[in-house]
Each structure stands twice: as structure tokens, then as C-alpha cells.
Image (cartoon, grey):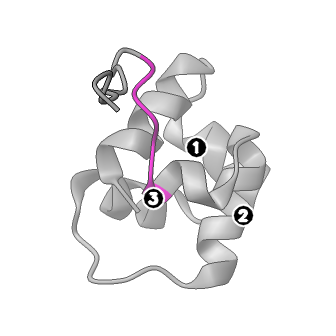
Amino acid sequence: MRMSEIKRLREERGLSRDELAAKSGVSSLTIRAHELGNVNGTETKTAEAIALALSVSVQALFFPVNINTSIQTDKSA
């Protein structure tokens, strides 16, 4: 789980860590640790709870899509 992605999504939704903790059932200390990158792994249930509270898929937490990135195609084919 990318720590900056959790923080970005949380702030984008106007949520404090405590509010995200209340919505997800995950402690604010755990959320803080993930945002700071102070974890070596994430339990599936934790990732699912945070994703659900942020209204995103678990995949979006791990593999965020940058909508500003263009896809290069080979036009010579």
C-alpha cells in the first residue's frame, strides 16, 4: 500500500486520520504508520477496510493510476 496514496485520498475527501479511523475501524495510529511508510506489510482486512472507507478499490491503494500519464502506442504497426 502506498502511504502517500492513503494520505492523498484521505485529504481529498476532507477526512482527518481520526475520521478515517472511525469510518474504517482501523486505528488512527495504524493509518498514520501506513501514511508514513512505517509498516513492512499490510493485512488484507486492513487494506480492505481503508479502501472501503475511502470508497476506492484495494487495487487503487496499491496501484494508483495517474490520469496525466499518456499511453504510448506504436503508430508504425
Q: Give the residue number, with chain letter if any, for mark 2.
A: 49
* Residue depicted at x 40% and y 41%: 5
Mark 1 or mark 2: which comes first in sequence? 1
Q: How many marks?
A: 3
Residue 39 as seen in the image, left or right of residue 6: left
Of residues 27 and 76, the one nearer the viewer is 76
Mark 2: few/some/many CA within 10 Å (<14, 14-19, 20+): some
Mark drawn on residue 18: 1
Distance between the alpha carbons at the discs numbered 1 and 2? 14 Å
Distance between the alpha carbons at the discs numbered 3 and 1? 22 Å
Q: Quadrant of the N terminus?
A: bottom left
Amino acid type for the residue under numbered disc 3: Phe
* Residue depicted at x 32% and y 63%: 33
Examine the structure image and report whether residue 49 is included in the region drawn in magenta. no
Contact (Cβ within 8 Å) of mark 3 with mark 1? no
Above-or-below relation of 49 to 22:
below
Amino acid type for the residue under numbered disc 2: Ala
**Magenta segment main secondary structure:** loop
